[in-house]
Amino acid sequence: MNSGTTNINRTLIKAPKETVWNTLVKTDEALPFFFGSICETAGGMREGATFRMVSANRRVAMVVGEVLRFEPPDVYSHTFTMTNIEEPPVTVTYTLTEKEGGTEFELRIDNLVPGSKLAKEMISSQGFIANNLKTICETGSPAFSGRMVGLLGPIFTRFSKKSQAVENWPL
């Protein structure tokens, strides 16, 4: 049941669809477009798999969820719960479409509770994610903002809540 609102961001990435897909779904390495976090899964990327986005030092779980759709190289959808915000999960869907000159990357967020802290965080993050994914796929390096988050990430994890420790969020 969709009880909230939807927010969509679309970005043209001047790279082949396979490049964008393979970059988007990487696991077990820091992803600058996901704020320097590492995606860990239970049993690999597939429908029904649980996952968590952890800090580069693997001590803090920042996001947890379940993969709802995994249709390479077109659609990846999952639930999304931030471990530091006690609000209902949202659904995030990434859709890749071949376009003249590259790949359209659509980042769709469903079930946002208007005015909630999670909605504000998610909507403000869409541009960062799209811009850094675009820059990595087009140049091989993250945008300046992604590099800065990577450098500052270890400092940010020092301010995480004890409840965000990875041992509290098993896969």
Image (cartoon, grey):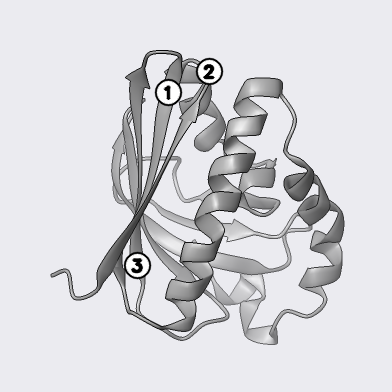
Which residue is found at the position 32% from the left and 29% from the top?
74
Which residue is found at the position 13% from the left and 70% from the top?
1
Element under disc 2: loop
Q: Disc 3, disc 1: CB below 8 Å?
A: no
Q: Crowding at label 1, few (<14), some or many (≥20) Cα neighbours within 10 Å?
A: many
Is 52 placed above or below 86 here? Answer: above
* Mark whose residue sits in front, 3 or 2: 2
Which disc, if any, is residue 15? 2
**Any part of residue 170 in sight:** no
> Quick check: 93 left or right of 44?
left
From the viewer's side, name the closer residue of 74 and 145. 145
Check disc 1 and give the amino acid type: Thr
Which residue is found at the position 32% from the left and 79% from the top?
113
- In the rendered image, residue 91, in percent from the top left (x then y), is placed at 32, 60
Question: In this figure, which residue is indicated by the disc labeled 3?
Answer: 90
* Mark whose residue sits in front, 3 or 1: 1
Question: In this figure, which residue is indicated by the disc labeled 1?
Answer: 103
> Quick check: 18 left or right of 47?
right
Element under disc 1: strand
Element under disc 3: strand
Q: CA distance from mark 2 to mark 1?
A: 6 Å
Check disc 3 and give the amino acid type: Val
Which residue is found at the position 56% from the left and 30% from the top?
23
Check disc 2 and give the amino acid type: Ala
From the viewer's side, name the closer residue of 113 and 39. 113
- In the rendered image, residue 39, in percent from the top left (x then y), is placed at 57, 49
Q: Crowding at label 2, few (<14), some or many (≥20) Cα neighbours within 10 Å?
A: some
Sequence-first tag of 3 and 1: 3
Sequence-first tag of 3 and 2: 2
